[in-house]
Amino acid sequence: MTWSYYQETKTGDYILVRDVSRKPSRGNLLDAAGPDEPGDPDSAAWDMVTEKFLREDCLRVDEQNVPKEWREALSAVVGGQ
């Protein structure tokens, strides 16, 4: 299972997305972890995103470029991935 970090271009928030989790029964949504409250990594929770959202509203970023507080909060949601 592969996870990738993305940064939302509008808010600057980070999300963690499981690359191979498309489920046709869910409209090909991808499993993700992201903040419930913009700008608040402590509000991170499970979410789902579309490839279109990632393509149009996010930039893929390397893990070492994600602030530690975001990495820790998102990893905690997905079980330490």
Image: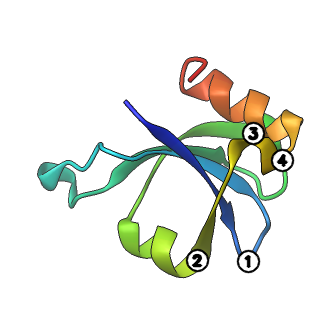
- Name which residue type carries label 4: Asp
The reply to whether callout 3 and callout 2 are in contact (CB within 8 Å) is no
Give percent across and percent down for residue 59. 63, 69
Name which residue lies at 83% across and 47% down: 40
Residues packed near mark 3 inside 10 Å, few (<14), some (14 to 19) or many (20 plus): some
Which residue in the structure is indicated by mark 1? 10
The residue that disc 2 covers is 57
Which numbered circle lies on residue 40?
Answer: 4
Label located before the other in sequence (3 or 2):
3
The amino acid type of the residue labelled 3 equals Ser
Determine which residue is flagged by label 3: 43
The residue under the point 79% across, 40% down is 70
**Residue 8 at what x, y percent from top left?**
68, 67
Q: Do the residues labelled 4 and 1 touch (CB within 8 Å)?
A: no
Give the Cα separation between the discs numbered 4 and 1.
15 Å
Which label sits in the foreground, 4 or 1? 1
Tell me if label 2 and label 1 are in contact, CB under 8 Å. Answer: yes
